[in-house]
Amino acid sequence: MSSRANVSTRRGLLVVDIQNDFCEGGVLGVVGGEAVAKRVSQFLVGAWPNYEVVVASRDWHSPEGDNGGHFAKVGEEPNFVSTWPPHCLADTRGAEYHPFFSQEYVTHHVLKGQGFPGYSMFDGEEENGRSLGALLHVAHVSSVDVVGIATDYCVRATALDAISQGFLVTIIPELVAPVSLSTGESALKEMLEAGVTIGHQLQ
């Protein structure tokens, strides 16, 4: 991919958690998750040459324990803000990418939340242990576009971490889906105030 990317720009695409458990029918399915999976795949067909790297993440939680308080304790109800029902358990169908999300143009994969909450892609690592931040710096990426699920949680956390690490950050609103419209709008406002750009699909 790097041979076709615009080396003067050095953009990266971060694809956040397009997984079965976060799409319709999943444990924490959001409305519009399947549509995002389809649209991201369609987007990549024409847009991949714009990117030096395309990195996709997956929640990959341990089936044992509460993953650092991320899962509600046994006998307690999740509050769906900081505690959640068990989801995206490692090596289960719920943790796999949604089948509508094509991995054809993905150059790197990271896993996050292994024993801890891990909302941001920057909490994730490749199988070889390399962090997302290190991966992007090795590729000399200076700006990232962020897409995926969910706008108000893992997309938000990823975008804000990218800003804090010095990247220029753009959210593509057609390619994200929130848990709820109200919290999604609040998250977009917070990201804008932090310096994130709200863009549109690249041509």
Image (cartoon, rainbow, N blue to C red):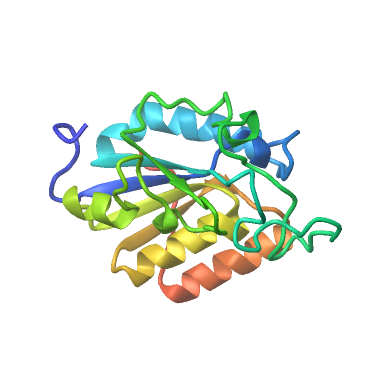
Q: Nearer the viewer, residue 64 or 34?
A: 64
Residue at (46, 59) in percent of width and height: 158
Q: Which quadrant holds the C terminus?
A: top left
Instruction: Give percent across and percent down for residue 134.
Output: 25, 55
Viewer-proximal residue among 24 and 130: 130
| Image position, residue 147 (x, y; %) | 48, 47
Residue 166 position by quadrant? bottom left
Residue 196 location in percent, x, y? 42, 66
Q: How many marks?
A: 0
Q: Quadrant of the N terminus?
A: top left
Image coordinates for residue 41, horizontal then vertical, percent: 47, 29
Instruction: Pick out the residue farthest to the bottom.
Output: 193
Residue at the far front in the pictured view: 64
Up-down relation of residue 95 to residue 133 (above or below)? above
Residue 168 or residue 140, whichever sits in front: 140
Image quarter of residue 13: top left
Residue 15 in view here: yes
Position of residue 102 relative to residue 19, above or below, is above
* Residue in the picture at 57% in, 24% down: 99
Residue 51 can be seen in this image: no
The answer to whether 45 appears left or right of 21 in the picture is left
Q: Is residue 85 left or right of residue 7?
A: right
Camera-nearest residue between 60 and 147:
60
161 left or right of 153?
left
